[in-house]
Image (spheres, rainbow, N blue to C red):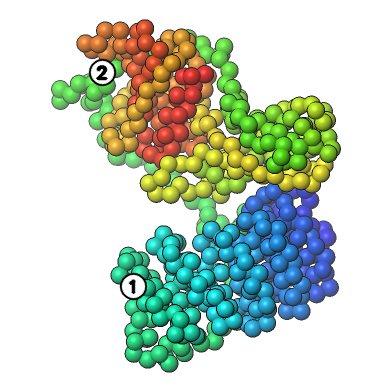
Amino acid sequence: IKVFFCKYNDPIYVKMEKLEIIIKLVSEKNIDQVLLELKEYSTEVDVDFVRKSVSAIGRCAVKLERAAERCIGVLLELIQTKVNYVVQESVIVIKDIFRRYPNRYESIIATLCDNLDTLDEPLAKASMIWIIGEYAERIDNADELLDTFLETFEEEDPAVQLQLLTATVKCFLKNPEDTQDMVQRVLDLATEESDNPDLRDRGFIYWRLLSTDPEAAKMVVLGDKPVIEDDTFRLDPSLLNILIGQIATLSSVYHKPPEAFVVRRAAGIANDEDDEEDEDDEEYEDGAGGDGDLLDIGGMNISDGGASSMYETKAPMNKVCGPEKSNGIEIYAGFRQLNGTIRMEMQLNNVGSPADIQGLAIQLNKNSFGLSPASQQIVCNPPISAGSSGTAAVELVVTPNMLAPVPTGQPANPQIQVAIKNMATGNVFYFAANFNLDALFSSDGTMERSAFIESWKSIDDRNELYGTVSDLPPSSVDIDTVINKFKANNVFFIARRPVPNAEGQEVVYFSMRTVTQMEFLAELTFKQGVTACKICLKTENAPYGPLAKLAIESLLRS
């Protein structure tokens, strides 16, 4: 089994696959060795890998009954680290252990209850609520613990709401005297305040059971649950036959047949709709129907106004980590794009590290941009000794599974959470750095004038952002200079025109496209002799609009 232990420089997808193989090969003979290895993995910097490692400990417990107690001991040690995501994943797997071995390891419930405040993920909350409801008779203040969750019932994830409803009913059936008001409150919330049909239906079922036949309610809600089983080797035989024929392809990694994730498209088929749209475009260009140029940029010169090679992108450096947080290392960090590569650049100051900084390991948490490091290893050559400084750059790539969804109606969070491990000392520390969206702009962001006009007209006015940038340096109110500077940062000039009946004012249009195919259109208004600029930005990607506007403002100020 040692052959499949993870190496520090293994790519993350290899580490994940090795964990699956370790779980398949673990036995009572090698469980102690495996637990030591998994415990070590749980202190790594990659959050997803740590979660998977903690989950693997739980799966070992479910698989090997005689080793379950040792697995729980390791999980309790990990909970004592107080690392947020480690605690949450531990709670999730302990719930599965409780379901696999009912009434055997309930002595650890007190430790879990002590960590309630750290739970902020829906699955972890739902697991903890299930434990409280299932063992309410053994927890002295079970009703008080559930009541803390009820305070935010309406804001919780549906999975948490469903568990809260069931756990509260369980608590009432076990201790009706003290929880009658609480169960009435949660039933009201589920049936009258919620628009989730699953929650509402379950609430009505519980209400009817409790009001007509409490004994039947006990049989339904408190009845014995089927014991969960180890599913490590559970694979449909027909699927297994397909996967054997697909060895050395992605199917053998995903455990899915090719047609489940490969989309085949017929080539060379003409699209009549596209032809009709092209004809419409030609009519628009010819001014058919008497429509004028909505932006008044027709007939203007659309050249880029000169070369931009003299302008080089710069990463805006900010202090992100002090020496008190990182055992003696001070870090300044910023982001930029260089030769088509997105980079996180760092200045490392060795203020008082107990050893020279020779190598670091880095991992990013899920973020609004889907960014992750192309390599987790940072080599400092030469090593940075105490009292000296050095620089390091990390190439970033866009990875779909690293994309954190943006909450509906909320702007995208510019923060990127970073974890770094000093390989010389073993110390792990964390910080957050704000990402400037211009580092994500693509070199193919230019647009034809007609396409720009159509895009501008098609975007809802509600997706417009306005602002004024004041006290600009002289170079940032010279339009030709701005065009060249913007081009170096993949912000592309479309056209410029004077403002009618406004002497000395001129409007300039630009387009941007990120490597993730988000488009932004900008209108900048300059006035001769005024060191300020008005910005109007339009985009269909409303959550990212403020970040694009901020990027334009920063480029103007630079």
Q: Residue at x 75, y 61 (%)?
A: 38
Q: Residue at x 59, y 37 (%)?
A: 433
Q: Residue at x 60, y 47 (%)?
A: 365
Disc 2 is placed on an element classified as loop
Q: Is residue 375 visible?
A: yes
Judged left or right of residue 358, residue 163 is left
Q: Is residue 245 visible?
A: no
Residue 245 % position (x, y) = 65, 61
Q: Which mark is residue 332?
A: none
Q: Which residue position is annotated with label 2?
A: 296
Q: Is residue 87 above or below residue 292?
A: below
Say which of marks 1 and 2 sits in front: 1
Residue 1 % position (x, y) = 81, 63
Amino acid at pointer 2 = Asp
Classify 10 Å Cα crowding around label 2: few (below 14), some (14-19), many (20 and above): some
Of residues 468 and 491, the one drawn nearer to the viewer in this rendering:
468
Q: Residue at x 51, y 28 (%)?
A: 438
Amino acid at pointer 1 = Asp
Q: Is residue 136 above or below residue 253?
A: below
Residue 286 % position (x, y) = 22, 21
Disc 1 is placed on an element classified as helix
Residues at marks 1 and 2 touching, judged by CB atoms closer than 8 Å: no
Residue 165 % position (x, y) = 43, 74
Judged left or right of residue 351, residue 165 is left
Residue 103 figure quarter: bottom right
Q: Which residue position is annotated with label 1?
A: 188
Of residues 61 and 131, the one drawn nearer to the viewer in this rendering:
131
